[in-house]
Amino acid sequence: MSERKKVVVTGASSGIGYSTAQRFANENWDVCVTARRENLLQDLVATFPPGNHLICPGDYSDPACADSIGKAIAEKWGSLDALANVAGVYMAAHVTDSPLEEWRKPFDMMIDAAVYMTRMSVPWMKNGGRIIHCTSIHCDRAEPGSSAYSMAKAAINQYCRGLALELAEKNILVNAVAPGFIRTAMSIVNGVSELDGEWFIQNYVVGNHLAMRRAGMPEEVAGVFYFLAGPDASYITGQVITVDGGLTITF
């Protein structure tokens, strides 16, 4: 029997990260789940089939978090096959009116975290590996208040392209997944999902700007992360895979 493959999944306490961690575990991978809320990670791992799974809570904007995950990999696994860097944060921040610390948060939580987690992962990918970062259709779309978020996602796309060139000689493939409207906590505003609101229905469903005429589910994005980590994606690197139900083909 071949050795089980090993993956680190960030942002695993909810949404796409939660579903991605579940998908890998159900496909017989050993999974290291990481997020800030340890109790939710414990609840998630309790749903996994048996395996040598790891729980590593932490704050990705702090490089010490990546260091602690690297130590856990060294002690428990000794190697790594994939990084699914799913964690993200959205907060509206006006270009000129928002406090600078608010403006910086998407960069700290997504760009810096992507760098820290990548630098931690590469040394453990001794026989090649896969790095998949979560980006967004916002990487080349704009709306009021989203400039910082969009800039961070665009930077991650370009980071993936550069990494794909630099890491190819190590047989490490690097890609990004760009979701559109997905039913996660990010879509909930004031306790109500904006994807059930009249503006979404009129603009995207009735207005035919969304080919599939519905929001996506986290599991549908998780499947793309799993595909990019698997054998059928062995000649894909430096790419951004859009998962948006056809949204961005309409404008």
Image: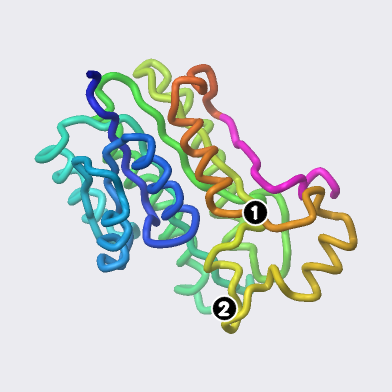
Q: Quadrant of the N terminus?
A: top left
Residue 111, percent across and down? 45, 51
Q: Identity of the amino acid at label 2?
A: Ser
What range of the chain is rendered magenta? 239-251
Q: Residue furthest bottom?
A: 190
Q: Earlier in the sequence, mark 2 or mark 1?
A: 2
Residue 106, percent across and down? 49, 62
Q: Identity of the amino acid at label 1?
A: Gly
Q: Judge from the rendering whether residue 196 lies leftward or rightward of residue 225; answer left or right.
A: right
Q: Quadrant of residue 76?
A: top left
Residue 75, percent across and down? 9, 40
Which residue appears at 47% of the width and 58% of the height?
Answer: 88
Residue 26, percent across and down? 37, 41
Task: Look at the picture and state if 44 lies above or below 227.
Answer: below
Task: Look at the picture and state if 26 lies above or below 88.
Answer: above
Which residue appears at 28% of the width and 34% of the height?
Answer: 6
Disc 2: which residue: 98
Q: Residue furthest right?
A: 207
